[in-house]
Image: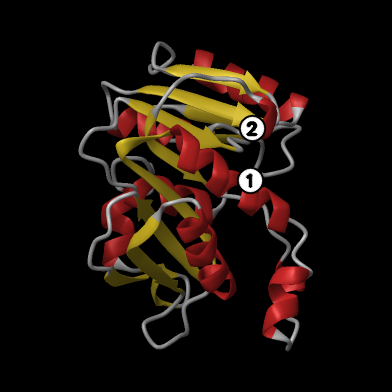
Amino acid sequence: MGNIFQFKEFSVNQEHCAMRINTDGVLLAALTESDCAAQILDIGTGTGVIALMLAQKFTAAEIWAVEIDQQAAARAKENFENSPFKNQLNIVNSDIFHWKTDLKFNLIVSNPPFYINSLHNPDPRKKVAKHADVEFFKGMFEFAGNRLSEDGKLQIIVPVELLGFMVEQGKLNGLNLCKQIDIQSFVDSEPFRCILSFERQLKTLTKNSFVIYQERSQYSEAYKQILKPYFLAF
């Protein structure tokens, strides 16, 4: 792929970034919804691609992108400064749990880190217990419970194996699952990721499916449609 990923309205330099642009991140950004996204937080921004896509989508929003890794934060800052959305974007090089802010966010998003190998344990409890980032998820929900506005949303993408744990952590912090999008490679394959949207208000759960490929090496029309505003290929 190379170090530079060119989008229609901006480019992303990925050099020295451990978390490169991936399907999870772009799907989360493209499928994120908000009716009042004035203040947005991207937890673990990496290259900054999700924050950049959200800046393109929500043109009136102020976006805060927090990244613990110094090199990645520096690269995200460079990507922000080289974009037409630089006045919307703020980079914070910090552990999200050590960041002191009084801001309330209408939208918090995250494509959190996880280790696939830890999700293949046949014991369902150990799938979560052995997960390297359990404490991160607990802290993320606690942070969201404190920093979301009354009408705010937390939207994340995670492996389907962690769905139950995410719902549990949401409830512990006053956040209810209101929307679930199951991500499938093909129409006849099992979901492997899910995009989850949490809110303070208790609502009827809306569930949808999203299929990436029409057939092998051929993207679905739905995939092309949601990424058309961003990807040169579409």
Badge 1 marks a residue whose secondary structure is helix
Q: Nearer the viewer, mark 1 or mark 2?
A: 1
- Residue that label 1 marks: 139
Q: Is residue 175 above or below residue 177?
A: above
Instruction: Please state which of residues 110 and 103 is positioned toward the viewer in this rendering.
Output: 103
Q: Mark 2 = which residue?
A: 96
Q: Residue at x 41, y 59 (%)?
A: 196
Label 1, label 2: how many angstroms apart (C-alpha)?
9 Å
Instruction: Answer with left or right where residue 33 lies relative to residue 142.
Output: left
Vertical side of 130 occupied by 173: above or below:
above
Closer to the camera, 123 or 87?
123
Query: Residue drawn 47% across and 71% down?
Result: 217
Residue closest to the eye, 62 or 202: 202
Q: Secondary structure at mark 2?
A: helix
User: Mark 1 near mark 2, Cβ–Cβ under 8 Å?
Assistant: yes
The three-letter amino acid code for the residue at tag 2 is Ile
Q: Nearer the viewer, residue 19 or 45?
A: 45
